Each structure stands twice: as structure tokens, then as C-alpha cells.
Amino acid sequence: MRVEWTFDDGVWRLAFLLHPEDETIGMCADGQRLELRTNSCHVRLPKEAGKPYVHPDLLAVAAWTVVAPWTRRRVSFDRPISAGLAEALRTGWGVDAGPLGEDRRDGARLAISYSGGADSVAVADIFPDAPFVHFQRVSHPRVPNRWTHYRSDVLARLARRTGRELTIVQSDLEFVLSFPRPGYPEHHAVAVGALLLADELDLGGIALGYELGSRWLGGDRYVHRYSPENPMWAADGSWGRLFAAAGLPVVLPVGGVSEAVTMRIALASDLREQVRWCLRGSGDGPCGECDKCLYKELIQAAVERRPLRTAITAGRGIARKWQQPPPYGGQEMIEYGCAHVPGIETTPFARAAEYLQATVESTRWLEHCYPPAIEEIPERWRKQVDTYMVDSVGLMDGDEAHRVETWGT
């Protein structure tokens, strides 16, 4: 793979050329099959940013979030990178990277990759002084946008209303895929804006809202079992080592708590009015018709101990997966919802509740924090996360931690 960045009028443009051994069909770190559509994309920075200095390691990692699925044996960047970054690529992906010749970088501040969902709002509550970097999808000049119902403009508008220090970065990188749909080639591409602004903002870490299910329980498309070695989000996994080598380690402040906890935190936050996990809703609110709205409504209803508010029935296509036997994506939250929502037997989750037989007692562990997740936080920010979790959430006891560590077995 040959990678080249150019900059003009506030826009970084990435172009990449496949080597003969590279392929146009690849795989994301979570196992999702991907197909490549085009070999270029752009990232637009705020006009006031001018042309910031960007360390070559940061440019290399930003590019790698786009080209990793297609690269097989070697990657050539357009400027020298540090030996530490090359070693992270060699040990994590088995690829040779170069040229070499740059020193390692570092920074001091923590920024939050802010999506506007409950998980990132919970992170914002833990770090109330951290700036936000928000990624906004925009159209690609050569790829038709057949996903106009995805309201990235609404999410960006809500981010502006938070009143927090905010940088919005626009990019069409999700359109490099032809399959499965517009989306990140790797999940870490959401941090491309933070990578390109890290030197200007003096960033030494990027906080993301991935929670217990994503970090420790296998997430949605992933392995559905306890996964301490999770290659996407473990601090010593391939991606964790790569970001750390670029002086921008990934920080998961809510990596030890469930979506029930992040939902509770978000609903009690001063950012509650800006919380929006739906990608299809208008400025007036979420669409209430997509599978994510139904899933999050289950969690919110469980947290508030009230009946489900939805017009979606079990016969709708988006509810079909919960009529089948488990496992389910995010199964721990389906269990929590089924155990805590009154009248669950009259909802689209009735069959799932019958299969799972979850109870309030059997899901109590999902209301506390898994201690090893705190130990993964880089030392300079660990105490703040530890104090918050102890004071506001509570730590799991040995039996509850055992539930995490035997998940999926």
C-alpha cells in the first residue's frame, strides 16, 4: 500500500495505491467483511485551524484507519515515521512500514471523541473540562450518497449546542466502502479528526465512549464472549499499541460500565437535551422507527423502571432478531432490559425475555464498574476515572467481576 496526504485550503486529502499483493476485499478488526469502492477521501478541518503542523506518525495512523483492511505485507507513507510506530504496525498487523526517521511525539491534553450518544455524554460527565472533537460525515465527490436519511447535520448541530469547547471535522472517508454500506473501514477512523488536530490541540489522549459490552464482552458483531484481548479496544491490543506509539493513546473512561450506567449518567447530565443516539432523526428528536431507537428505548425504560414507549411491534423486520433464540448483539443489555421493564411480555422483546429468563438479581452486576477497566486508563487520567466510578457508580465485587469474566462461556 502506498499512502499520500496533501493539504489545501483547510482540507487534508488522502490517496492510496494498492500494491499487487493487496486486495479490494478485506476485513475490519471486528470480523466484518468489507469491499473497497474508491481509493481517496478528504478530511476538512475548521477554517480557523489554518494549516496545522501534524506529526507524520499522526498522519500515518489516520491513514491506517482507512487502509488497514486492504493492506497485506507492506505500507509506504509519504513522509518518515518513528521506529516505534513501525514496530506497532509490524507486531499488530505483520506489515513492514516506512520510511523511518521521525522522533516520537507526545501531548498533554485529553480530548473526547464526541458523538452525542449516551456513552460519549457519560465520558463528558467524567471529564467536564475536556474538549470535544466531533466527526461529521459529508458526501464524497465521486460516490453517490444513497444514505441521505443519515442526519449527520443534526448530530453536528446538537454538538454545537453543548456549549463545550468543540471542533467539528468533516470527512467523506466512510464512502471508500462499497460494502456493507457507508461506514468506517475501521472503527478507529472516527478519531481521524483528533489525530490530525492532536499537535495543534496538544492532545496526549483521545477518550471514546466504548463501554463494557464493546470492550470486555465482545460487542455487537464481535465474538460474544469475555474478550480481555479485544484487538480493537484493549490497551495492549494492536490498535491500542498503535495509537500509543503515536502519542495519542485511546482512553475508555466508561469501558468498565454497561450501557445502563452510561444511560443513567447521560440522563442526569447537563447535556441531557443534546443526547441523540439515533442517526436518522430530525432536529425535533429521534426517529423512533429504527432498530437502534428500539434498543436504546429498552435501556432507557429499564433505567427509568417504566414500560416501553414504542409503536414498533414484534412483527416488524427490525425486531425480528429478538424473536429468535440468543445470542444477541448487546445481549447483556437485552437481559437488563427484560429484567427491569414492566410489562416486557407485551413488547417486541417478549420472546427474548422467555429465552433469557433474566432477573433483577441476575443483572445487578451491570450497575457497577469492572475494576480492571480502570487499570487500563493511562496513569495521568486514571485517578479521575477511579474517583468518579467509586463515588457515582460503585465497583463490582468478586462475584460480579466473575460474571464478566465468564460471559459467553
Image (tube, rainbow, N blue to C red):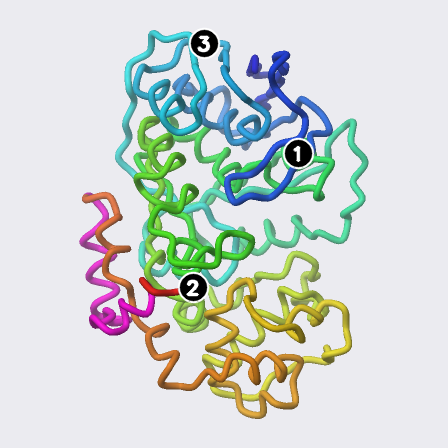
Q: Secondary structure at mark 1?
A: loop
Q: Does 131 appear above or below 202?
A: below
Q: Residue 296: x percent and y percent?
A: 56, 70
What amino acid type is highlighted by mark number 1?
Asp
Residue at position x 37%, y 81% in the image: 362
Tell me which residue sits at (39%, 29%) in the image. Answer: 92
Determine if residue 4 is in view. Answer: no
Who comes first in sequence, dot 1 or dot 3? Answer: 3
- Give the Cα separation between the discs numbered 1 and 3: 23 Å
- Identify which residue is drawn at 35% across, 26% down: 246
Q: Is residue 393 magenta?
A: yes
What residue is disc 2 on? Answer: 408
The C terminus - image quarter: bottom left
Among numbered discs 2 and 3, the one appearing first in the sequence:
3
In this rendering, position of residue 35 left or right of residue 403: right
Q: Which residue is mark 1?
A: 172
Q: Amino acid at mark 2?
A: Gly
Callout 1–callout 3 Cβ contact below 8 Å: no
Q: Specify the principal SS of the magenta part.
A: helix
Q: Secondary structure at mark 3?
A: strand
Q: Are marks 2 and 3 in contact (CB under 8 Å)?
A: no
Residue 209, position in %: x, y?
Answer: 43, 53
Relative to 83, is 341 above or below? Answer: below
Q: Which residues are magenta?
A: 380-404
Q: Is residue 99 above or below residue 129?
A: above
Calculate the distance from the C-alpha at mark 2 to the C-alpha at mark 3: 44 Å
Q: Residue 297 is drawn in which quadrant? A: bottom right
Return the mark for residue 79. Answer: 3
Q: Residues within 10 Å of mark 3 (few under 14, many from 20)?
A: some
